[in-house]
Amino acid sequence: MDPGDVTFVHISDSHIGPSADYRRHGMAALPCAERIVATINAMAPQPDFVLHTGDVVTEPHDASYAMAAEVFGRLDAPVYYAVGNHDTAADLRRWMRVGPHMPLLPDDGPWSYAFEVRGHRFLAVDARGPDAIDPQGALSAAQWSVLDRELTPDGPPLTIFTHFPLLPMGSPWIDRTMLVRDGDVLHDRLAAVAHRLSGVFFGHIHQPLHMSVDGVLYSSAPSTFAQLTGWPTDEVAGADPVALPGYAVVRLTAAGTTVRTLSFPRP
């Protein structure tokens, strides 16, 4: 049977703090998380699922995760998470309710799992590295073992989601500090099976960016509360005072992948 059409909402970098009045980059995180949940729940028809590509919270404290679990637990659609550099795999497993999925590694290791919707396969890649290299990402030997099994020439259409970008994107501070170490090696593996790939979806950079390299679509979602600048002259990260909170609606069809980046008024 041919794969069917799939629609999902891509959100990222909600950075919920330990209190309702927590602010980061001078902006309140929780009201924006509540607004995006209400926005998604009002969609008709509902998306097949919601993809959150990490940094659910800013610090891995119980109070922050309890608040995040309550807010995102209101979503009517299933939710899936990637591990951000501000998250831990153990905390996400413990606190966040996740849609039906198949674990690909033991529970004490990286959080890599897969799920399928209408003949499409979706793969969570945990690229959170040791704290010493933060905010860069890295792929463990265990995660590479999963990729070795998944990145085969034959198989259903495959969508990958992770927190960190793999390739340089022309902004000095991003390219110097935010990429996955050996991301170029993973890209080469992805390019070899580009005919199967619907896209690689990520966050971390707090801005929307879409690029196609060697037939592989890379797409980041804006942060649900605060964007960062990423111009070719930006040597250091800076908050964008004008950009609104945002999200993306992604449609997978037999013809290809469509990404619509949208914004919403700051509460």
Image (cartoon, rainbow, N blue to C red):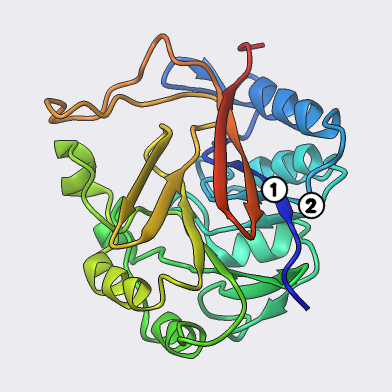
x and y, in percent, of residue 56 in the image: 58, 45
Q: How crowded is mark 2: few (under 14 residues within 10 Å), some or many (20 or more)?
A: some
Q: Is residue 120 visible?
A: yes
Q: Nearer the viewer, residue 50 or 219?
A: 219
- Report how far apart the C-alphas of labels 2 and 1 lie in the structure: 6 Å
x and y, in percent, of residue 80 in the image: 68, 57
The amino acid type of the residue labelled 1 equals Phe
Q: Are marks 2 and 1 in contact (CB under 8 Å)?
A: yes
Q: Nearer the viewer, residue 160 or 69?
A: 160
- Image quarter (top left, top right, bottom left or bottom right) of the N terminus: bottom right
The local secondary structure at tag 1 comes to: strand
Quadrant hosting residue 170: top left
Number of marks: 2
Left or right: 25 in relation to 99: left
Counting residues from the start of the chain, the first of labels 2 and 1 encountered is: 1
Residue projecting furthest to the front: 255
Q: Residue drawn 84% across and 41% down?
A: 46
Kindly identify which residue carries mark 2.
48
Q: Residue drawn 56% across and 74% down?
A: 112
Q: In this view, does 187 lie above or below 72?
A: below
Q: Residue drawn 46% across and 51% down?
A: 202
Q: Residues within 10 Å of mark 1 (few under 14, many from 20)?
A: many
Quadrant hosting residue 140: bottom left
Q: Which of 183 and 217 is in front in this view?
A: 217
Q: Residue 176 carries which label?
A: none
Kindly identify which residue carries mark 1.
8
Q: Is residue 110 above or below residue 85?
A: below
- Image quarter (top left, top right, bottom left or bottom right) of the C terminus: top right
The local secondary structure at tag 2 comes to: loop
x and y, in percent, of residue 252 in the image: 64, 54
The amino acid type of the residue labelled 2 equals Asp
x and y, in percent, of residue 17 in the image: 59, 33
